[in-house]
Amino acid sequence: MKITLHSPLDMHLHLRDKEMLKVVAPLSSKSFAGAIIMPNLVPPITTIEQVKNYREEIYASTKEDNFIPYMTLFFKDSYDYDFLKEVKGFITAIKLYPAGITTNSEGGVSGLDSKDLAMTLEAMSELGIPLLVHGESNGFVMDREREFVTVYERLATDFPKLKIVMEHITTKDSAELLDRYPNLYATITLHHLLITLDDVVGGLLKPHLFCKPIAKRYEDREALLELALNAHPKVMFGSDSAPHPRSKKESCGCAAGVFTAPIALPALAELFDKYSKLDNLQPFVSDNAQSIYGITPPKKEVVLAKESFKVPSSYGEVVPMFAGEELSWKIEEVR
Ligand code: NCD
Ligand code: ZN
């Protein structure tokens, strides 16, 4: 059995920079037609100059592949209309992190009162720049996303023209928001469709499955599967593939992030096949994102075949999800 995906997109991707970027960027650009590139470098991407340099760095490692890096800025409440108007041509969205909530987010927003954010969010609304949100409070780890629901509701109500993407949703509560607010959208990762907290800490600790937001309960995973497998039109695939060197994962103080870029499409095909939903993979991995963002990615056909694929134990210093295991689908050809 085979399927062909047209211009798959990864709407939430960490490529890092320098040597790490050289290893991981080609693993995405080979099989994806484009990706939303996260700005949480050290220091974070906050200026036009940084956006341009980072884009050049990505192109240098992916130029053979007909791949568009859709660039983002790291949200600051000091961005005004004039700055945003100037930067708009170079970016696709702006990513908001609550301060200190995840990897390299120290410079994020400390109060989430929409009055403090109003100048920037109003300008983004007017200019049609989507807001991407890491939606976690600083409460108890299993409650962080649920506690953020009121923030999403307030943002969606106060800025009705702003497109707001709830990034990497992991709970039933977030899933339920989608049909209640016309301007709320969501990305879902591969790993949150596959695992629960049990897989991370229920047996021996699995550092390579540790990420933010942490995987939740079975009923949460069910709600995410329901959205993804039925290709809910407000939902997009965003891998949140977040590479860290093995030494930072298999260590005391494990960094958060699951590396899935090179296995994402075969693993998604396996999942959608298992539920007899392969027809919905195309909207989930590309069409929905094209309509939501109003983008037209380069043409790329990815042929996936139902044949065994042994996942490498590492890519450079990075260990992928399913390292050393067999998947039942593989990428046969990209054209
Ligand atoms: C991401 C990273 O490593 O940059 N980590 C993660 O666990 N997902 C940051 C993020 O998206 O939260
Ligand atoms: Zn991320």
Image (cartoon, rainbow, N blue to C red):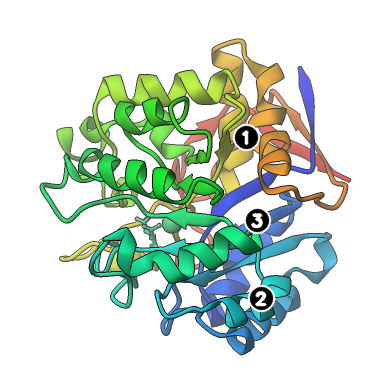
Residue 35, label in figure: 3
Pointer 3: residues within 10 angstroms few (<14), some, or many (20+)?
A: many
Residue 130, label in figure: none
Residue 331 x/y as whole percent:
72, 38
Give the amino acid type for the residue marked by disc 2 in the picture. Lys
Q: Residue furthest top?
A: 276
Element class at badge 1: helix
Q: Quadrant of the N terminus?
A: top right
Q: Nearer the viewer, residue 139 or 58?
A: 139
Give the residue at mark 2: 85
**Res. 273 visible in picture:** yes
- Looking at the image, residue 49 sits to the left or right of residue 151; the answer is right
Q: Nearer the viewer, residue 246 or 124?
A: 124
Pointer 1: residues within 10 angstroms few (<14), some, or many (20+)?
A: many
Mark with earlier residue (1, 3): 3
Q: Is residue 160 above or below residue 56?
A: above
Mark with earlier residue (2, 1): 2
Give the residue at mark 1: 266
Pointer 2: residues within 10 angstroms few (<14), some, or many (20+)?
A: some
Quarter of image, res 83: bottom right
Q: Is residue 144 above or below residue 57?
A: above
Q: CA distance from mark 1 to mark 3?
A: 17 Å
Q: Nearer the viewer, mark 2 or mark 1?
A: 2
Residue 43 x/y as whole percent:
42, 84
